[in-house]
Image (cartoon, rainbow, N blue to C red):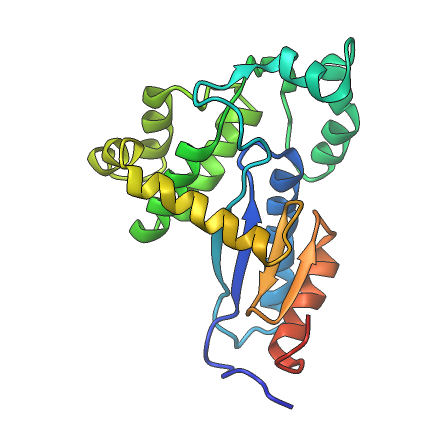
Amino acid sequence: MNTLDPNEPLAIEIVSDIVCPWCFIGKRRLEAALALYAQARPDAPPPRVSWLPFQLNPHLPAEGMDRLAYIESKFGPGQGHGRYARVASVGAQAGIDFAFERIERQPNTRAAHALVALAGRQGVQPQVKEALMEAYFLHGQDLTDAEALVRIVTAAGLDERRARECLIDEHALAAVDAQEQASRALGVQGVPFFIFDRRYAVSGAQEPQVLLDAMLAARTGPADAT
């Protein structure tokens, strides 16, 4: 059986969209799973977590669209915010107080994903990812507004100058598209999608124990396991 070096941290890649409520729930469940992993393998180094882009609505205009119009175009007239009642209930169990009623615009998330990628290079990716999700889901901030984006990510530790440059950097934005296309080419069709050591994958906002089992299997299972 081919196993990885136990001294190397477990690599966890999460394909997700910032405006996907199940991705936010999946993030909380991953955090719970990481705590379980630390208990199960107290001598192991902490896993290395990275966030990869995925756009639920890649064809939205850069300025986004009215949230209610978006919901009705997706689910039908009259559906409105009540469509997310179940998600809000599950989110509450995960410690997330979703405030869908505060959201006025459905954003295109390409620019926000570019900032998350930049945050990965600056060592503050978890903080920036969390800040953007909180800004959108808890406070209804407009993630199509460049000034709002800069304010959110700099408060989370990203360099302001580099953040502003990133938002107008076509190479950074194209990199988001390329990474998303790579994920789709691997078969990722829905998010969140968790990849453990490039050996095991779990689709959906699974419970912490399911994620823990995948983490442990990735450390001990055969190299070609999926």
Indicate left or right for 176 with 83 as reference.
left
Quadrant in the rendering for residue 118: top left
Observer able to see residue 126: no
Indicate left or right for 128 with 206 as reference.
left
Q: Residue furthest top?
A: 78
- 208, above or below 142, in the image: below
Task: Locate the N terminus and report the quarter of the image it occupies.
Answer: bottom right
Q: Position of residue 104 (x, y in %)?
A: 56, 12
Residue at the image position 31 percent from the left and 40 percent from the top = 157
Residue at the image position 58 percent from the left and 51 percent from the top = 184
Q: Position of residue 17 (x, y in %)?
A: 55, 39
Observer able to see residue 65: yes
Q: Position of residue 218 (x, y in %)?
A: 63, 73
Q: Nearer the viewer, residue 160 or 38?
A: 160
- 161, above or below 39, in the image: above
- 49, above or below 172, in the image: below
Task: Locate the C terminus and report the quarter of the image it occupies.
Answer: bottom right
Residue at the image position 20 percent from the left and 34 percent from the top = 161
Q: Nearer the viewer, residue 56 or 138?
A: 56
Indicate left or right for 20 with 136 as reference.
right
Q: Position of residue 110 (x, y in %)?
A: 44, 34
Indicate left or right for 144 with 92 as reference.
left
